[in-house]
Image (tube, rainbow, N blue to C red):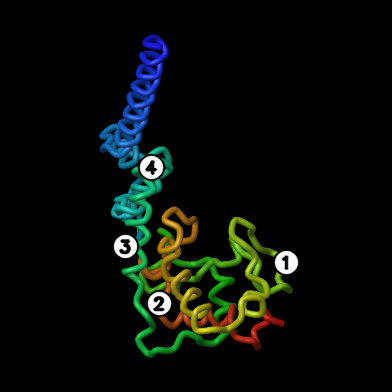
Amino acid sequence: MKTTYIKKLLTIAGLIVASSMLQNAALAQQKNDPKFNKMMADSFKAEGIAGLDRIQQDETQKFCSDPKFANSKQGEKMREKIQKINMDSIKPPSDGKYIGDWKSGEKIAQSGRGATWTDKTDTVIGGGCYSCHQIDPKEISYGNIGPSLTGYGKMRGYSPEVVAYTWNRINNSKAYNACSNMPRFAHFKLLNEQQIQDVIALLLDPASPVNQ
């Protein structure tokens, strides 16, 4: 009996130690790595409007650059914090209108221009939406990294909740998924308020080809 009891205690102790080691390993992933930072700094150079400030990571980017920590138990708690930070950063439209012009939205979705070293500060930035999504069913060139948005409004409806969700997703997708591949369009000033309204119209206007 005593031998069995001792074995159980040793097993429990072993599990506790193993758990502690895993936690410490996860936390270690969050430590600053000077060698990595130097490699990053040496690999990029400022040119045109693309400055080295772009490789300075914020809290969200640091979290998502460390998948071991992000998928740990501590990471789950941090993930919730990161998503809340991003959700709290989203502002509703200043004019109270969520839906713009779907025709302008289509042009924005088609455009991948802007924010590169070859662009100027006044270059109008596009959404590049077709790079990751199918949108207008008549467009044959599109990516599939993201889900198809064809029939977006038709399938989901046009309720205030759907409209608000769509606004939030385009503004800052990391409010729902901390490590979403979708750019934070409003956070990085890639799209302005009117552009976001127009893209939402492309997805939610019943007259848009997306919903035909």
Image depth: mark 3 or mark 4 in front: 4
- Tell me how far mark 1 sits from mark 2, CA to CA: 27 Å
- Residue hosting label 2: 192
**Which numbered tag is attached to residue 140?**
1
- Tell me how far mark 2 sits from mark 3, CA to CA: 20 Å
Q: Residues within 10 Å of mark 4 (few under 14, many from 20)?
A: few
- Residue hosting label 3: 85
- Residue hosting label 4: 73
Front residue (pair 169, 119): 169
Residue located farthest toward the front when viewing the structure as drawn: 1
Label 1 or label 4, whichever comes before in sequence order: 4
Q: Are marks 3 and 4 in contact (CB under 8 Å)?
A: no
Q: Residue at x 37, y 60 (%)?
A: 83
- Tell me how far mark 3 sits from mark 4, CA to CA: 19 Å
Q: Are marks 1 and 3 in contact (CB under 8 Å)?
A: no
Q: Residues within 10 Å of mark 3 (few under 14, many from 20)?
A: some
Image depth: mark 1 or mark 3 in front: 3
Quadrant housing the C terminus: bottom right
Q: Residue at x 47, y 70 (%)?
A: 170
- Label 1 sits on a secondary structure element that is loop
- The answer to which quarter of the image holds residue 80 is bottom left
- Tell me how far mark 1 sits from mark 4, CA to CA: 42 Å
Three-letter code for the amino acid on which mark 4 is drawn: Lys
Three-letter code for the amino acid on which mark 1 is drawn: Ile
Q: Describe residue 161's horizontal placement relative to residue 5 as left or right.
A: right
- Label 3 sits on a secondary structure element that is helix
Three-letter code for the amino acid on which mark 2 is drawn: Asn
191 w.r.t. 42: above or below? below
